[in-house]
Image (cartoon, grey):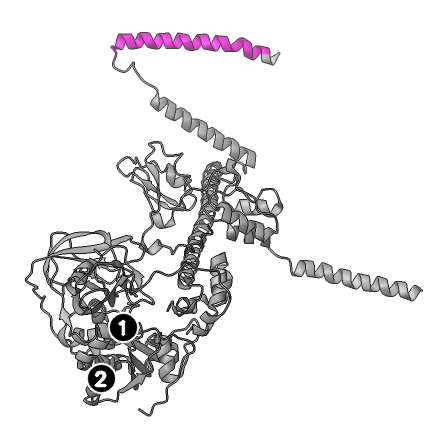
Amino acid sequence: MLTAILVIVGIGIVIGLTLGWSAIRFKVEGNPLAEKIDAILPQTQCGQCGFPGCRPYAEAIAKGEADINQCPPGGDEGVKKLADLLGVEPKSLDESHGTPKPKSVAFIDEQTCIGCTLCIQACPVDAIAGAAKQMHTIIAAECTGCELCLPPCPVDCITMVPIAEDLPHWKWKHPVIELKRVA
Amino acid sequence: MSRELFTFKGGVHPSGHKEASNTRPIHPAPLPKTLVIPLRQHIGNPAKPRVSVGERVLKGQMIAAASGAISTAVHASSSGVVTAIDEQPVPHISGLADLCITIKTDGRDEWIPHAPLDYQTMTAADLRLRLRDMGLAGLGGAVFPSAVKLDPGTAQTCPTLIINGGECEPWITCDDVLMRSHADEILQGTAIMRHLLGSSEILIGIEDNKPEALDAMRAAAAKLDFAVEVIAVPACYPGGGAKQMIETLTGKQVPSGKLSTDIGIQVFNVGTAHALARAVHHGEPLISRLVTVTGHVLRPQNFEVLIGTPMHLLITLAGDREGMSGVLMGGPMMGMPMPDLEVPVIKATNCILVKSDALFPPLPRALPCIRCTRCADACPAELQPQELFRFAKAGDFGRAQEYHLFDCIECGCCSYVCPSHIPLVDFYRYAKSEIWAHEKDKQAADLARERHEFRLFRQEREKAEKAEKLAAKAQAKRAELTATPAASGAATPTEADAKKALIAAALARAQAKKAEAAPQNTDNLSPDTQHEIAEIEARRAKILELARQPLESEEKT
């Protein structure tokens, strides 16, 4: 009897120590789930979800503090992907956070710009080139279309220009198969 | 020929219709009044304009230069004046416009001075650079810049060079008539390719439905000082595809996701070899090509066409007829419907196929896939078209890629045999372009993430740097102040003393500043008045002194 108890207790101690040691040895830095969520988010960094950027929103979703339908740039497709990843039912986009818009880039009217640098400070991806009292301009290739530069501009010289479809960005459409009409 | 030939899997045998256009001699197309020359005619980066509006250009003058590693130049096809550099409709299924240079021709067709290249004394890199500036690109259909393909790379040599005279697609005969009439020049071009690639084995594959072309090429090959094997291959669509031609001639398959050069084989179209010979032996850049105009026209034939000539001009030349139901650029299997006939002929235009309801009856409505797998039997790339269709239709692009969607050469055999008339290739093209778009979006998102993270890091760093700077400044001031009393022999000051001294110094500085800034309006007065003011000030001071005294006494008590 005593031997049996000792053996069980011994095994318990050994397993406990192993588990404790491996918890320290193989500790995962950061939150792998947040990483995966962040990879799905569109990285617009627009803050429409109510968080200061995509990463904080991803962390909030991972902790269960935010819903998956708060990202308008990601659209319904993004919600579906997040639902797939998290194993929950997809829902429609929460309209209170905004509605999806066509992809755009900011454009500075250089005649009106006074060079105040306020938009440069607001840009989350440093996509505006310029300096104090120097004309500013958008680096179109790096602009995410987040619209964060619009409110701080004191002279309203920034407009959002939708990206027009051109040859390099043209996509084949889903073929339409006409169904046989039944009289 | 004793050479053993191999057969690739699949393929179809559509009726050729080649005799419609290959019996008439090559006819040079007349010089049009305006030439519209697109800057994106090849795979890779579009060429960059080198001329300005209003400038006079000569025939063969470079009007746009290659930009980047995979690109090639664009030239004026005739002499004239540049009237516009803007977006014009181009031969693309979307009907979208792209950047073009428009030249109003002056009818003189005046050449820019040009001379043959002595390619044997030039270094390979120099020669390739010259060919890039001559605008050479593959004329078989893919329009890949030839200078890039003529670089054997780190392997130093490319043992096997295949000249592709397959021309398997029905209706098209431009390669056939080129081989019949310009066999010598094609082989001169081949000799230059051999020189650049260091190839030891040169094979010319021609489908056996072109006996005249085979004879002409064999006769020309017999005159050469190096061995060239002209091989008749069985006619089977898509036997003229580069990968299929390689397999037929050598029995080797190009592995998935690799290039033919990885297995030591390079393939060029006969038209490219001809253009290369014109460029090197005559110094002529690529400004014209052979175009088959066939189908529902009165006189189907091949024209020597300047790049930039509008397509409707060629159709009129070949004799347009009533009942035209559409125009394809390319053949019936892989051709692209043209949204507009104003579009110009480009380097990729091998054929203008005019359709009519009699020749190309409209397809019946598509029916559901019955999974008969006839498409899988016909697929020359050994894919599973029915599965690819299922995934593409459902938007499951990941699975489509697992089924090697990108090995699809879009030959159209699957659609050709499909008993349900499903436009299968359209689905594959749709899936491919969606995957590319996703890839682009992902790259943009990664860039945005990286830049955002760097911005956060930069803000943190700037904050830390500012704090450090302030701390260093305060430290320096403190050291300065503590040094002064120490010099005057006082006892070592404590931390509190140092702080007090700092505050005192700051106060003194502020007072000095105030005194400096305070207005002195009494300077310019007479001595009497100044004396009076001094007396008043003295009185004021006395009263202030008196007013303070009782307070001090109160404090003491």
Name the residue tied to disc 1: B17
Position above or below: B519 against B268: above
Chain part drawn in magenta = B525-554
Relative side of B468 to B207, left or right: right
Of label 2 and label 1, which has the lower sequence position? 1
Q: Provide the chain ID for the residue under circle 2.
A: B
Q: Is residue B155 visible?
A: no
The image's mark for residue B217 is 2
Q: Provide the chain ID for the residue under circle 1.
A: B
Q: Name the amino acid type tagged 2.
A: Met
The verdict on residue B546 being magenta is yes
Q: Nearer the viewer, residue B545 or B141?
A: B141
User: Which quarter of the image is occupied by the N terminus of chain B?
Assistant: bottom left
Q: Are marks 2 and 1 on the same chain?
A: yes
The image's mark for residue A119 is none
Relative image position of residue B547 (x, y in whole percent): 49, 8
